[in-house]
Amino acid sequence: MNIVLLGAPGAGKGTQAAKLVEEQGLCHISTGDILRAAVKDQTPLGVKAKGFMDAGELVPDDLIIDLMKERMEQPDTDKGVILDGFPRTTTQAVALDSMLSELGRPLDAALLIDVDSEVIVTRLTSRRMCRECGNIGSAADGETCLKCGGEMYQRDDDNEETVRNRLDVYDKSTAPLIDYYHGKDLLVKIDGDRDPQVVFTDVVSALGL
Ligand code: AMP
């Protein structure tokens, strides 16, 4: 099964993807995670991407498409993928269609996790992430990861100004993908403003898992 996760930053795509990986054994590909690792390691990609990421802007399509072409060719994608944070523009969506058709793997669904923007601002400015295992938590959970004991930190782009810019970028560049996938009869919409486990129950039933 190959799934695209759609939704504004902070809608809960990462959380739902982690649950799908745990229960269905799919391969989770998050372009945001790959880029953050590249920035941390100061690779050529990371050096090029950092300024865009810190400002809440999208990294240019050609860099992202090259990175995804390479990632999709790795053998762990054979069992099916959950794409989290890709595609984010129509150009990326068209490139994904060609990648999947070259690999002979159809897209099964584009799952939209729908959450109101003001809820997102509150969620993201209090979001924390584990430096060690990438677990997603909240400022209210304290400074230690509840899963692995690692240090929880706030992402550089989770401050309010950058979050509002990321939401504008989402509306302008990524929201048109909702119509794109609706037109292909692949769109599945889920209300994401509920407890993550309740959202997951809907995700599982909407995907027929
Ligand atoms: P995320 O973790 O998905 O919120 O991504 C964090 C940041 O990485 C975004 O704000 C963008 O700057 C960059 N990014 C991640 N995925 C993409 C993508 N598919 N296209 C362009 N930029 C991306």
Image (spheres, rainbow, N blue to C red):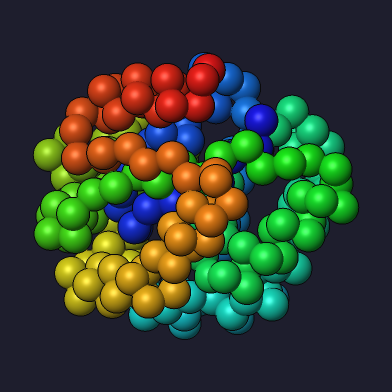
Relative to 180, is 119 on the left or the right?
left
Residue 18: x, y in percent? 47, 32
- Residue 155 lies left or right of residue 108; in this view the side is left
Q: Residue at the location (71% across, 65% down)?
A: 95
141 over 47 or under it: above or below: above
Residue displayed at 19% across by 60% down: 117
Q: Residue at x 31, y 33 (%)?
A: 145
Residue 125 seen: no
**x and y percentages locating residue 106 in the rendered image:** 73, 41
- The percent coordinates of residue 35 (x first, y second) are 56, 62
**Count of marks overlaid on the render:** 0
Position of residue 70 relative to residue 19, above or below, is below
Look at the image and tell me whether residue 167 can be seen: yes
Q: x%, y% of residue 159? A: 22, 67
144 or 7, nearer to the observer: 7
Q: Quadrant of residue 13?
A: top left
Q: Residue at x 57, y 20 (%)?
A: 24
| 58 vs 3: above or below | below
> Image quarter for residue 197?
top left
Q: Which image quadrant: the N terminus?
A: top right
Left or right side of 163 for 41? right
For this rendering, which residue is in front, 131 or 16?
16
Q: Closest to the observer: 48 or 30?
A: 30
Q: In the rendered view, does 133 fall on the left or right side of 140?
A: right
Q: Quadrant of residue 68?
A: bottom right
Q: Is residue 67 above or below residue 128?
A: below
